[in-house]
Amino acid sequence: MIETISWDLYRTFLHVLNAQSLSGAARSLGLTQPTVGRHVSELESGLGLALFTRSQSGLQPTEAALQLRTQLEEMQHAAASIERSAHGHNAVRGAVRVSASEVVGIEILPSILAPLRAKHPELAIELVLSDAVQDLLGREVDIAVRMTQPQQDLLLAQRVGEVAVGFYAHRDYLATRGEPKNVADLAGHSLIGFDMETPFLRAASAKLGAWKREGFAYRTDSNLAQMALVRAGAGIGAYQVGLAERDKNLVRILEQEMHMTMTTWVTMHSDLRHSARCKTVFDALVVGVKELWE
């Protein structure tokens, strides 16, 4: 029975899982609510599993539904990758899925992608902004801009430069709290950093003893939130030097003692080097990021 289940039923199931309601899934799929309900019933019958229970807050997934989710999302990523390849293998058209950190995706990539899209109007860019590393081998994304060198042999990687990171505070904060004269003075200041341990936090802690989670007055794993807190005068935090220089109200703290760099790479699966649309986006990102950070 399972072998005959249509992918449409699985797709409907994922939409219901995300919307937690039949009506929400129907709107996102462009189907009627009865059709969505019928799809869920057919899938439950075909699998011999109960996938949802009803509650006042909507449809709640069963344990069986949650176990199916990861595998079906992988199937969805694979189907999307096949579709992108079919639509744009020999021409610069179709979708290219690009992953980058929040900061890079918002502050750096738009100025590269806008003229690229103007030159190739049939190109569609799917921009995935996350500080989590997306899976290139599993084709969750086509291209990634990363701050760590990829290790897998199947990935094509191009080093595009070093990003300088300094530590900054708003001049209003310094007018009230004073400017630290040395690293030891940081203990008397409001520091802004990560909640979870990251490679950057480990490197900063090794170099700057005071830069540790327990010493942070503000903790967030969003780099954008950290930058916003610095701009609001909340305290001292890490900031890409090139971006900080755009804001005259930001003052660099202990430039000699508190200086770090991150190597940046543009990466994609080596199989995609023959795809015109992916190669075009990859080359544009390599050239564009190099120009911005040199």
Image (spheres, rainbow, N blue to C red):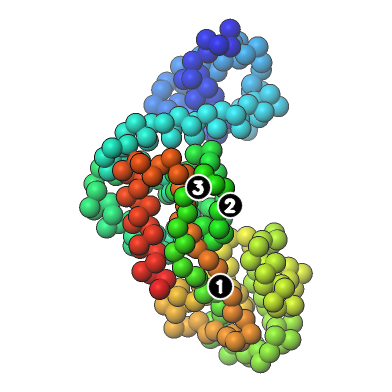
- The quadrant the C terminus occupies is bottom left
Q: Are marks 2 and 1 in contact (CB under 8 Å)?
A: no
**Residue depicted at x 49% and y 70%:** 162
For the point 27% across and 58% down, the residue is 115
Depth check, front residue: 172 or 212: 212
- Specify which label sits upstream in the sequence, 3 or 1: 3
Q: In this view of the protein, can residue 126 be seen by the observer?
A: yes
Residue 198 rendering spot, x and y as whole percentages = 66, 61
Mark 2 vs mark 1, CA separation in Å: 20 Å
Tell me: residue 73, above or below residue 5: below
Disc 1, SS: strand
The residue that label 3 is drawn on is 155
Residue 54 visible to an observer of this rendering: no
Q: Nearer the viewer, residue 12 or 292?
A: 292
Disc number for residue 277: none
* Element at label 2: loop
| Distance (Cα) linking label 3 and label 2 | 8 Å
Q: Amino acid at mark 3?
A: Leu
What amino acid is at disc 1?
Thr
Q: Residue 54 is drawn in which quadrant?
A: top right
The image position of residue 112, as x and y in percent, is 34, 60
What residue is drawn where x is 62% and y is 60%?
221
Cα–Cα span, label 3 and label 1: 23 Å
- Where is residue 35 drawn, in percent x and y? 46, 16
- Mark 2: few/some/many CA within 10 Å (<14, 14-19, 20+): few
Q: Amino acid at mark 2?
A: Gln
Q: Where does label 2 land, which residue?
A: 151
Q: Closer to us: mark 3 or mark 1?
A: 3
Q: Which residue is mark 1?
A: 261
